[in-house]
Image (cartoon, rainbow, N blue to C red):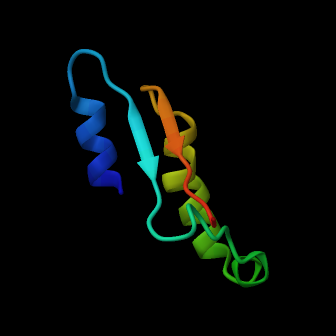
Amino acid sequence: MNKALDEVEKSTGAAALITTGEGKFFSNGLDLNWDGMNPTFIRTFVEGLFLRILTFPIPTIAAINGYG
């Protein structure tokens, strides 16, 4: 995921990041019971990918597919 974000961030001119899911779900969410027992995962996820997407310098769009 970080490689893809690097590529979008290095682009010149007009750009946007569009994320999509595959199959029936865009995201199944986080398993908070498991995550709570794995603080290393939470720290890595929040300080890594989640924070990067929240502060990404290019407009982002989520093309959310769903059950249907």
* Farthest top residue in view: 13
Q: Is residue 65 left or right of residue 58?
A: right
> Observer-nearest residue: 14 or 64?
64
Q: Quadrant of residue 12?
A: top left
Which quadrant is home to the C terminus? bottom right
- The image quadrant of residue 14 is top left
Q: Nearer the viewer, residue 14 or 24?
A: 24
**Residue shown at 59%/73% (left/top)?**
41
In the displayed structure, would residue 34 be above or below residue 60?
below
Side of 17 relative to 34 (left or right): left
Question: Measured from the top left, where is residue 51 in percent x and y?
Answer: 56, 45
Q: Is residue 11 left or right of residue 48?
A: left
Q: How many marks?
A: 0
At horizontal 47% and vertical 60% (from top left) the residue drawn is: 21
Residue 29 x, y percent position in the rendering: 67, 67
| Coordinates of residue 65 in the picture (x, y in percent) | 55, 56
Q: What residue is rendered at 47% in x and 26% in y? A: 59
Q: Is residue 61 above or below residue 19?
A: above
Which image quadrant: the N terminus? bottom left
View extreme (front): residue: 68
Residue 60: % across, % down: 48, 33
Q: Residue at x 44, y 26 (%)?
A: 57
